[in-house]
Amino acid sequence: MLVGMRRFGAVIGLRPEHRETYLRLHREVWPAVEARLTASHFTNYTIFHRGDLLFAYYEYTGDDYESDAAAIAADPVTQEWWKLTDPCQLRLDGTPDGEQWAPMTEAWHLD
């Protein structure tokens, strides 16, 4: 049963010495990475940066988030992508164990 669209926001640090690498990678995101996200019902995915912070926003339109997120994590191409992007990032204090990005709580939304 479809539960409707869900919005997600997350934040992580950006290592200053890897800023240009990270931004270059995201100017040329691999089509297979994007295809896996789309197949897992992740839409409207956007990453913003300000100084040494990255903010990600995406919408999930599927009906089994855990399964779809696991499919992304198990994807060999995505795993290779993360080998390039993860070293550019700096986990923030309070990020849950097993997570790279710290989830944010929605405070307000306007349609």
Image (tube, grey):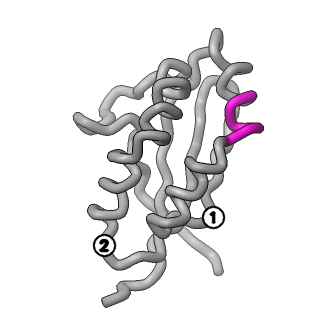
Read off the residue under disc 1.
44
Q: Is residue 33 left or right of residue 1?
A: right
Q: Residue at x 48, y 40 (%)?
A: 77
Ranked by sequence position, the earlier of labels 2 and 1 is 1
Three-letter residue code for mark 2: Asp
Read off the residue under disc 2.
64
Q: Is residue 69 left or right of residue 90?
A: left
Circle 2 crowding by C-alpha within 10 Å: few under 14, some 14–19, many from 20: some
Three-letter residue code for mark 1: Asn
Circle 1 crowding by C-alpha within 10 Å: few under 14, some 14–19, many from 20: few
Residues 104 and 83: in front is: 83
Residue segment shown in magenta: 24-29
Alpha carbon distance from label 2 to label 1 = 18 Å
Identify the main secondary structure in magenta: helix
Q: Residue at x 54, y 24 (%)?
A: 84
Q: Position of residue 88 (x, y in %)?
A: 55, 21
Identify the image quadrant of the C terminus.
bottom right
Residues 78 and 2: in front is: 78
Residue 26: say if magenta. Answer: yes
